[in-house]
Image (spheres, rainbow, N blue to C red):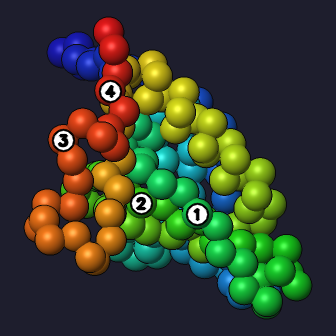
């Protein structure tokens, strides 16, 4: 009896991968971060493994934090805010060469948004003095993708 084979799409090429590091820079943890052209992966655990992914077009904002100890050891934490339901706000902790990784991630996010033609809406807070409970005007603070 012949085996049936199922053709799956080939795995995406991984552009960057790094292990979460300890505060002193040693890679003795069980969390691995990976980045492809369209997704960010977080794999963690030793006996029980959890794998999460975020589509890059869902990333809303990127930030960078570097404590004094992280700066001494050449590390940093990339803070990511996304619209993904399972991974809203999360961090890539203790990353080497964090500035260039964040910049590369930012470029890939913008490329993926343009490729998918995703329009982003940024809601700006007008301040606490507004009497209106609705903190935005419908058209004043919105970027619209004209197709």
Q: Check disc 4 and report the residue beneath it.
A: 144
Of mark 2 and mark 1, the one earlier in the sequence is: 1
Question: Crowding at label 3, few (<14), some or many (≥20) Cα neighbours within 10 Å?
Answer: few
Of mark 4 and mark 2, the one earlier in the sequence is: 2
Residue located at (24% from left, 36% from top): 139
Question: Crowding at label 1, few (<14), some or many (≥20) Cα neighbours within 10 Å?
Answer: few
Residue 119: image location, x then y, percent? 34, 30
Residue located at (22% from left, 17% from top): 4
Contact? badges 2 and 1 (CB < 8 Å): yes
On the rendered structure, is 46 left or right of 123?
right
Which quadrant holds residue 36?
Answer: top right
Of mark 3 and mark 4, the one earlier in the sequence is: 3
Q: Check disc 1 and report the residue beneath it.
A: 63
Of mark 4 and mark 1, the one earlier in the sequence is: 1
Q: Check disc 2 and report the residue beneath it.
A: 81
Element type at mark 2: strand
Q: Which mark is residue 138?
A: 3
The CA span between labels 4 and 2 is 21 Å
Residue 7: image location, x then y, percent? 32, 16
The CA span between labels 4 and 1 is 24 Å
Q: Is residue 145 visible?
A: yes
Q: Measured along the vertical axis of the image, is residue 24 above or below residue 135?
A: below
Q: Which one is in front, 114 or 125?
A: 125
The quadrant the C terminus occupies is top left
Residue located at (18% from left, 15% from top): 1
Which quadrant holds residue 117?
Answer: top left
- Label 3 or label 1, whichever lies nearer to me, is 3
Element type at mark 3: loop
Element type at mark 4: loop
Residue 19: image location, x then y, percent? 65, 65
- Label 3 or label 2, whichever lies nearer to me, is 3
């Amino acid at each position: 009896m012949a085996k049936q084979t199922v053709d799956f799409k080939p795995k995406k090429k991984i552009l960057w991968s790094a292990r979460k590091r300890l505060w002193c820079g040693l890679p003795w943890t069980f969390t691995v971060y990976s980045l492809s052209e369209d997704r960010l992966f977080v794999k963690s655990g030793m006996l029980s493994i959890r794998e999460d992914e975020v589509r890059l077009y869902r990333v809303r904002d990127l930030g960078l934090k570097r404590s004094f100890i992280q700066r001494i050891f050449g590390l940093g934490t990339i803070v990511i805010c996304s619209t993904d339901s399972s991974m809203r706000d999360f961090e890539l902790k203790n990353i080497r060469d964090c500035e260039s990784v964040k910049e590369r991630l930012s470029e890939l996010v913008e490329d993926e948004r343009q490729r998918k033609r995703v329009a982003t809406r940024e809601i700006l807070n007008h301040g606490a003095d507004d009497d209106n409970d609705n903190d935005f005007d419908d058209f004043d603070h919105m970027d619209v993708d004209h197709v």
